[in-house]
Image (cartoon, helix red, strand yellow):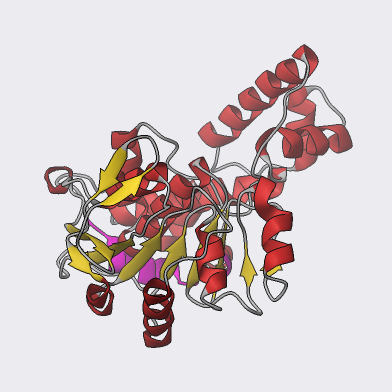
Amino acid sequence: MTAVSAAAATTRIALVSFPGIRAFDASVITEVWGVDRTDRGVPPFELRRTAAATTPIPLRGGLSLTPDRTLSWLARADLIVVPGLDDHVTPAPEPVLEALRRAHSRGTPIAALCGGAFTLAQAGLLDGRRAVTHWNLTELLRTRHPGVTVVPDALFVHDDNLWTSAGTAAGIDLCLHLVRTVHGAETAATIARSMVTAPFRTGTQAQFIEHPTPHADRDADTLAAVRAFALTHLAEPHTVAELADRAGMSPRSFARHFQATTGTTPLRWLITQRIAAAQKLLERTDLPLPEVARRTGFGSEITMRQHFATHLATSPRDYRLAFHRTPPGDRG
């Protein structure tokens, strides 16, 4: 997906529906893109519920979804989102699979939540590509679709304009990430605040984290305090050894407990937080790039630029051009 400015045309999102889709996933898609938040600076979205026909579709739990467009509307969509399924081995209707194939051939980004990866796999879109699904469905996806490279432990994965996510909450993470990719971190954070959910979890984070004992809970509290310290002192250099000392642990023990608690390594987590902080400054202020790099702990504009290229596939300068919207009087 490519970035668009706030003045660009309304972003069009297609929710692909058919019998058997999960009501939760359809609700997540609707909550992210189907609520008007333009009064809070969020750009306008046009969310359409598409299906082979516009007759109501029964969902589990006595619910139903009424499509307002047929699958032909996918040709107009900027993004297509496929919910997961209640029964992951049930074939999706062939008109849906064919519509998804045509959309992918046009280059339209397609995202599948949770078991929606099975729908993309049924369409043949994941053959030879990386994908993720709910951790409890990993072996089933690998067995039924051996041509797919199944990633065992990630929140979401991107390969060739196709996005797949792990279960339930990871679908929210992917939707917010897609908003962030096109409209910037501030827009994604505004939507996350409205939904009262975490604004930023990286796709490489572990799907689930276990805390089996009170001792593990105490370690988590200690590590939370260390993370809070690092976040309030981002401009300062931090090493694993220094953070481990603050936690009262050896570097090896600290790294192990940090990974178990957060699903990522200390340095990867720190880089992610620096990037997120830099994004906000680039969007909200006119600070020179070297000052943004200094305030967020990158040290130099060159280092910040390298990390933006690696993690966001763009440069700080281009990111600012795409997403800058300085509030009145806010100049850093």
Q: Nearer the viewer, residue 140 or 103?
A: 140
Q: Left or right: where does residue 223 sit relative to residue 301?
A: right
Main SS of residues in magenta: helix
Outermost residue toward the top in this view: 214
Q: Is residue 150 magenta?
A: no
Q: Left or right: where does residue 107 sit relative to residue 76?
A: right
Q: Name which residue lies at 29% across and 68% down.
A: 322
Q: Nearer the viewer, residue 174 or 27?
A: 27
User: Compared to 181, does 206 lie above or below?
Assistant: above
User: Compared to 256, does 298 lie above or below?
Assistant: below
Q: Is residue 314 magenta?
A: yes
Q: Position of residue 35 (x, y in %)?
A: 20, 45
Q: Position of residue 248 (x, y in %)?
A: 80, 22
- Name which quarter of the figure residue 141 lies in: bottom right
- Name which quarter of the figure residue 227 lies in: top right
Q: Nearer the viewer, residue 98 or 212?
A: 98
Outermost residue toward the bottom in this view: 105
Q: Position of residue 36 (x, y in %)?
A: 15, 47
Q: Which residues are magenta?
A: 310-325
Q: Name which residue lies at 43% across and 46% down.
A: 172
